[in-house]
Image (cartoon, rainbow, N blue to C red):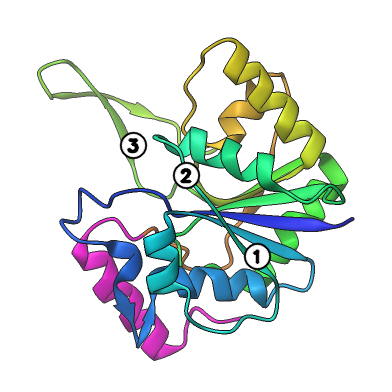
Amino acid sequence: MPTAAIIVAAGTSQRMGFDKLAASLRGIPVLARSIHAFSDAPSVDEIYVVCSEARFRELVTESFSKPIIRVDGGSSRQESVQQGLRALSPEITMVAVHDGARPLVRVGDIEQCIERARQYGASSLARKVTETLKRADAEGFARSSVDRALLWFMETPQCFRLNVLKRAYQHVRERNLQVTDEVSAVEAIGISTFLVESSGSNLKITIPADLEFASFLIGENVWAD
């Protein structure tokens, strides 16, 4: 099944105070590292990067083994993903959506997600909740514990048969719904997503400390397949 990756990189990085996708991780920009992971994944045929022309020109300067196509983003992540879906080649039947700010995703995890999406129609990389969870009241006092046994932190890539994700986003668009990820979109049409547990750190660069930790992991080579 021909497979495309949509790498979402149209955000403004306002919480960081600087362009986190341009930040250097051991000499390579965050966004470029994310692209490299999908370029190295055998199951991925094409890569679509949703970002501005200026960001693409500045950060995607290296050679990759797969075609890299730039797509203009929208005003939200949801709109940016839909822009990417509209740009896909006609032969594409599977799609993997990934946050450009997750540069440590492993090739093996990408492959596992795509394989499970082929099997079940929808899959996502995720990690189990291991911390103790509490439910608080409006004043900020812990009132009760939350059973974490079946709780997961969602990550990307989130992978789907293309017809499933397109149908989900059509449903979301027609009803003017707002979703924060693709799993939420397919949930809206009654489709469950198989969760693939991350085999290692797949952190999302959100604050400056994340860059330091990611750089450490790369230096220790504990994130590679």
Q: Amino acid at mark 3?
A: Leu
Q: Are marks 2 and 3 in contact (CB under 8 Å)?
A: no
Residue at 47% x, 21% y is: 178
Instruction: Describe residue 86's horizontal placement relative to residue 179 as left or right.
Output: right
Q: Residue furthest top?
A: 175
Magenta-span inclusion, residue 56: no
Q: Give me the disc on residue 133.
A: 3
Q: CA distance from mark 2 to mark 3?
A: 36 Å
Q: Amino acid at mark 1?
A: Asp
Note whether 74 is above or below 141 in the view shown. below
Note whether 87 is above or below 205 in the view shown. above
Residue under pointer 1? 109
Q: CA distance from mark 2 to mark 1?
A: 26 Å
Residue under pointer 2? 73
Q: Looking at the image, is mark 2 or mark 3 nearer the viewer?
A: 2
Q: Which quadrant, please, contains the N terminus?
A: bottom right
Q: Residues within 10 Å of mark 3 (few under 14, many from 20)?
A: few
Q: CA distance from mark 3 to mark 1?
A: 27 Å
Q: Quadrant of residue 190?
A: top right
**Residue 104, visible in the rendered structure:** no
Instruction: Describe residue 183's horizontal placement relative to residue 190 as left or right.
Output: left
Magenta-span inclusion, residue 208: yes
Residue 86 percent coordinates (x, y): 67, 39
Segment colored magenta: 205-225
Q: Looking at the image, is mark 2 or mark 1 nearer the viewer?
A: 2
